[in-house]
Image (tube, grey):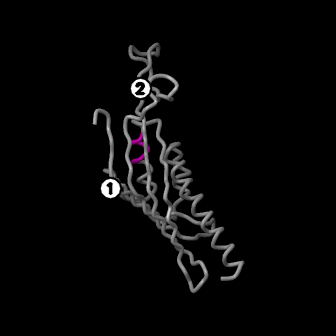
Amino acid sequence: MTQRVALATVMDRLAIDAVITGYAVAVDDGAWSDYGALFTPDGRADYRGAGGVEGPAEETARWLDESLRLFPVRQHLIVNRRIELEDLGGYTGDRAEVRADYLNPMCPARKTAGGSGADGPDRADDGRTGSAAPDFVAGGRCTFELRRAEPGWLIRTVTVHEKWRRTPGV
């Protein structure tokens, strides 16, 4: 492997890592246009393994937006990333697979006193008042299939396999 090929491989790995991080941030921030921009035009997401839906990225973004409104505070930590690049005889191809574990703590909206209604407005507990502990935590594994495109690496598919979950009172 030449230095040029080695450098290109490292650059691909860094770019893929940035896409996976961008995915987690987009979901956590509810930035659905950013989420959609991470996918190929035919990109799909499969959340059935975590109790969700499967379909085109645009449709799953709408489902995520609706479902995650219950949890305005969320943090997807995507770790233990294993990146496999397509090998074309010593040169990196245009396909990659990433298998990574995730940990996802989430806090639901809370009622605060002194708001407009009798119970106050919904708000997320920011950890500075009340309990900082999440009410819902899940963990599992994501598999991402990526393709190199004109703008760079994009997600072709993401499949989520929840392995465990902890909910309030459990």
Residue type for callout 1:
Arg
Pick whichever, 84 or 48, lies toward us: 84
Q: Residue at x 33, y 41 (%)?
A: 166
Residue placed under numbered mark 2 in the picture: 110
Q: Residue at x 53, y 77 (%)?
A: 86
Q: Give SS at disc 1.
A: strand
Q: Is residue 166 left or right of residue 28?
A: left
- Numbered disc 2: secondary structure: strand
Which residue is most to the left? Answer: 170
Q: Quadrant of the C terminus?
A: top left
- Image x and y of residue 101, in percent: 44, 56
- Residue 22 inside the magenta-drawn segment: no
Kindly give the residue lying farthest to the bottom in the view shown: 89
**Could you tell me if residue 81 is visible in this image?**
yes
List the residue tagged with mark 1: 48
Mark 2 residue type: Arg
From the viewer's perspective, tell me whether residue 65 is left or right of residue 8.
left
Q: Quadrant of residue 5?
A: bottom right
Circle 1 crowding by C-alpha within 10 Å: few under 14, some 14–19, many from 20:
some
Q: CA distance from mark 2 to mark 1?
A: 28 Å
Give the vertical position of 28 relative to 133 (above or below).
Answer: below
Dominant secondary structure, magenta: helix
| Residue 157 % position (x, y) | 44, 64
Q: Residue at x 41, y 26 (%)?
A: 110
Which stretch appears magenta? 63-68
Name the quadrant of the N terminus.
bottom right
Residue found at the far right of this picture = 4
